[in-house]
Amino acid sequence: MEITKIRCKVCSSLKEGIILDHYNLKICLTCFPEFFKKRINDTIKKFNMFKFSDTVLIGISGGKDSVSLTKALKDLGYTVKALHINMEIDENSEKTENFVKHFCETEKIELKIIKLQQLFPLPLYKLSRIAKKPLCAVCGTIRRYIMNKEAKEEVIVTGHTLDDEVSFIIKNLIFWNDDLLCRINPVLIEKEGLSRKAKPLCLTTEKETAAFCRILGINYIDTPCTYKSEVYNVFKDITTKLNKNFPGSIIGFYKGYLKRIKKIYPENREIHLLQKCKECGYLTSSDTCSICRLKGKLLEYKDG
Ligand SMILES: [Zn+2]
Ligand SMILES: [Zn+2]
């Protein structure tokens, strides 16, 4: 984030600020945090994500996106609870957990921590081998499962940014993953067994979440997960380059995709795809959910 002398478009004063090319906006350091929060609140309302009276359960990883979102939602007056899932990958996992604890204490946010071992007795890399699936995929499945199990009346909120959403769409377009492309939505309505889910940062870039943290002096964990797949990195880079070379392009692409999705996928295929897991009741596309299947494989693994 580059700080320069600018004429602020909001308060008109000439002072230190940042340039957000994708909005064609010059904004001072004093006005930016309010702009950032207002943008999130506008996004929540635009997509009817949740009501002011709802309690949100935010998945907090300790990175700039979930940290800035937690802070913004709390400042906006929403009732926020946080959930941190420690996947116990390496020594950084412990460091991150401690950081999240400290952040939530400072911000007076109720925090629940769940460790992988509470669900599985083996480390993630072994689970990935047993499941015969990439580590990132297993990690994501377990995280989503825990979030869904932990949310009772709460709306699940995640720190997915515009950059995340766009790289996800581009990736799935390239590989034509229709089952995923038809489901893209910044808010998923609750249905039996699954809570409502929302992504209030879907129109906000990572450049902004970083700026928000830096301007307010909020620390965050900046070490990317060592297991991030090459595929993830490739599409994230493409998205970053698009936004840099064609400011505003990714936000236009994302909004355009949401506008066209019903034409591209006229029937909501998701409804037909999901049913209740016969073991645990979690909604799944087959008769047993992937977590229960993994637990089953684990028993065989121990026996053999
Ligand atoms: Zn200003
Ligand atoms: Zn299950």
Image (spheres, rainbow, N blue to C red):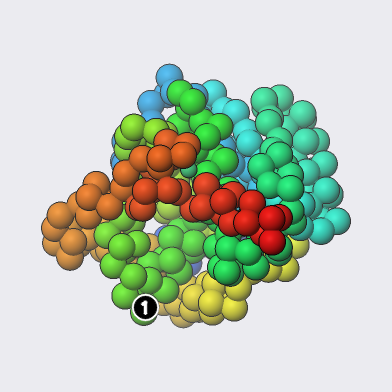
Residue drawn at 81 percent across, 58 percent down: 90
Horizontal and vertical percent for residue 130? 63, 64
Nearer the observer, 203 or 271: 271
The residue wearing badge 1 is 175
Q: Nearer the viewer, residue 46 or 155?
A: 155
Q: Quadrant of the C terminus?
A: bottom right
Q: Secondary structure at mark 1?
A: loop
Residue at (59% x, 49% y) in the render: 295
Which residue is drawn at the image coordinates 31% and 75% (left, top)?
Answer: 176
Residue 36 visible (yes or no): no
In the image, 232 versus 236, the foreground residue is 232
Q: Residue furthest top?
A: 53
- Residue at image coords 34%, 70%: 177
Percent coordinates x, y for residue 302 in the rendering: 71, 55
Judge whether 226 appears above or below 201 on screen: below
> Residue 186 at what x, y percent from top left?
37, 49
Residue 263 visible? The answer is: yes
Task: Check disc 1: other Cα within 10 Å, few if <14, some if 14-19, many if 20+.
Answer: few
* Amino acid type at mark 1: Phe
Residue 112 located left or right of residue 106: left
The residue closer to the viewer here, 229 or 282, is 282
